[in-house]
Every structure is written in structure tokens, then in C-alpha cells.
Image (tube, helix red, strand yellow):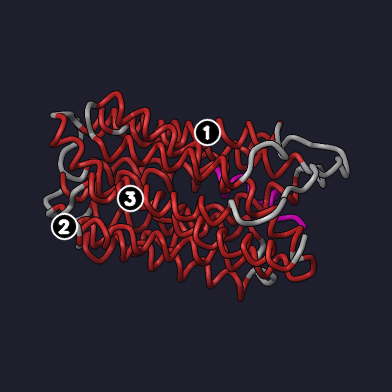
Amino acid sequence: MNTGTKFLLLATGLAAFVLLGMAQAIFGPVLPSYAKTFGLDVSSVGWLLSLFWGGCLAAVIAVYFLPTQLGPKSGLALAAIGTALLALMNNWALVLLGGTLFGAGYGVLAAVYNPRVLSAYGARGPAMMSLLNAIFTLGAIAAPQIFLAFNSDPALTFWLFTAFAGLIFVATTMMGDTRVQAQAETGPLRIDWPVLGFAALGIGMEASLVGLGPTALVIAGQSEAQATALLSLFFIAYLIARLTIVFIANLVPAFFLYIGATAMTAALAAGIVLGGDPTILFPLLGFGCGLFFYGGYLTGLARMGPSTRVSAIMLGAGLCGAIVQPIVVTQALGHLGPNGFFYIVLGMTSLLLVAALLAAPRLLRR
């Protein structure tokens, strides 16, 4: 791979990860707007979030089986088509289709850029991957502010996403072949079902807080603009958590961080339920969310052996949680009062914390 191609791979990767961060953060703010536009309740509009993650899971599976056939161009094309359908807002069915295609684009981009950058940059690959993930969070912080700047208009916001995806796509056409061959299996695969369950529930909780948190804040009495601004603060705390991991990763077992994320999330949800100020406590939930993926993912790699399939399996488990958990939450949300969402978060994380503490003696062993 020549120098120009490596540069374009990294440059388009950084831009694509900004888009991915924007994608993860934007559905929370836009769901109340879609509900109002199409006359839907929260249990119905929540399907958009689950279909987005469903498209993402399908794409990750496709990349697993076709690692050299699907690449950045495929992901960006899917993202551009999906966001255009989300922007058109002709009818709810097309919005759902747009969300699914946008999720598929997200899945392809997330699955292909990391290994290609890692391979292209050799010894510097891990550092470049860390840069991609830091840039991701910046996109998540920016997206709610963009939505507010466009007067909370989903159409204008998603047209901007479409244009951005299109520009990155054009840039990818100028780089050479960046494909890497699928790595061979390097050891036995040992499925650890409890670890997969923790991954699914942790990422499901993250997806619920990000995707449904702003809607929950509106139900609890915050304005849509205030809820959107609080989501940006949530992602600032999320970024701080990810940066903290850089300094403590070698000092603290990964599953200990998972336990800490669960305990912190439960405590903050309890604070809101007991009358605490959500404008302070909700953004702090971002710190706990920033630890869920790292704690579950690295625990899985440690417990399930060196097989190259483990990474895809762990990602797939997390995505299953991101698909199912928001559906479950939205079905119960309308029956529990203004703070119903936070009662659900408190209940789920309390049970998860008990399970994690019971599993700790086994999973904390090095």
C-alpha cells in the first residue's frame, strides 16, 4: 500500500468515524421530532433505533463472511442512501427503511476501517485505531449541537449527514486497494455465555441511554432543546471515560471496570428517581456508558481464547443487546410515569450489578 493510499485511508477513516459518532448520538434528539411529525407514541418511534442497530448487526455479519468484498465505499453508499431517506420524511415506512440502511452503513464502516488501518500502519496501527475512536466521540458530541443549530429539524440534519457521507465517498474513490485478507484462526474458540450476556446487556443499556435518554428527559419535563443539549454533555462525560481508560487500562482488570460502570449507572438512575436534578445526573451517566464496551469486550477476549472470531462474536452480542433492549424499554416506558425510563434503568442495572458481582470471582481471575 503506497503512502498516498495510506494517508487517504486514515483521512477518510477519521471522517467516517466522525459520521459514526454523529449517527450514534443523533437518534436520541430526533425521536421526539419524528414522534410529533408522524403522530406516534414512544413505543412505536423506538423501532427506528432498533432497526438502525439491526441493520448494523446484519452488516457486521456480512463483513465477517465477505471481508474483502465489502469496504469503505459500500458503507458510505449505504449511509448516504439511508440518511437521504431519513431526510425525505415522506412516510414512516421509508424513515424505518432509511434507519436500517444507515445502520448497515454504520456496521460496514465500523467493521472494515479498524482492521485496514491496523494493517496499513503496522506498529503504529494501534495508535491510529485509538485516534479513530477518539474522533468518534467528537462526532457524538457535535451531532446534538448541529440538530439544535438547524432548529431541531431532522430533514436538514440528515441532509447534512448525506452530504458528508457523499464527500467521504468521493475521497475513497481516489485511494488504492486497502483490503486485507481475513486472518486465519489462531487458536480454539471457547464460548463463554455469561460474558456474551454481559456484553449484550451492557451495550444494550448504552444504546438505550443514548437513543432514548433525550425522549425520557422530555417526558420528565425538559424541553427538547434542553434534552438535546444534555446529550452533548453526556458524550463529553463519555469521552472523559474513554480517555481515562488509556491511563488505567493496565492497572485495573477489564471486568472491574464493567462492574464500576454498572454500579455508577444504577446509582445515578437512583438519584434521578429519588428527585435528583436530571440536568446534572443525566450527563454523568455518560461516564458509566463509556466503560461498558471496554469492560465487556476485553473480558470476552481474555475468557474466550485467541480465535480471530471472538472479536466479531463479541461485537455481535453487543449489537443484539442494542437491538432488543430499546424495544423492551419503550414497551414499558408509557406505563411508569414521568421518570419511568429511569426506574427501568435502575431496575435493570441493579439486577445486572448483582449478576456481575456473583460472576466477579471467576471473571476477575487473570
| Label 2 to label 3: alpha-carbon separation | 13 Å
Magenta stretch: residue 314 in it?
Answer: no
The residue stretch that appears in magenta: 355-366
**Image coordinates for residue 346, horizontal then vertical, percent:** 35, 46
- Mark 2 / mark 1, whichever is N-terminal: 2
**Image coordinates for residue 13, horizontal then vertical, percent:** 57, 58
- SS under mark 2: helix
Magenta span dominant secondary structure: helix
Q: Which of 20 and 352 is in front in this view?
A: 20
| Amino acid under disc 2 | Ala
CB of mark 2 within 8 Å of CB of mark 1? no
Mark 2 neighbour class, 10 Å CA radius: few under 14, some 14 to 19, many 20 or more: some
| Label 2 to label 1: alpha-carbon separation | 30 Å
- Which residue position holds label 3? 26
| Amino acid under disc 1 | Cys
Q: Residue furthest bottom?
A: 247
- Which residue position holds label 2? 225
- Which residue position holds label 1? 320
Mark 3 vs mark 1: in front: 3
Q: Which residue lies furthest to the top in this view?
A: 93
**Image coordinates for residue 143, horizontal then vertical, percent:** 33, 58
- SS under mark 3: helix
Quadrant location, the C terminus: bottom right
In the image, residue 348 sits, relative to residue 221, either above or below, namely: above
| Label 3 to label 1: alpha-carbon separation | 20 Å
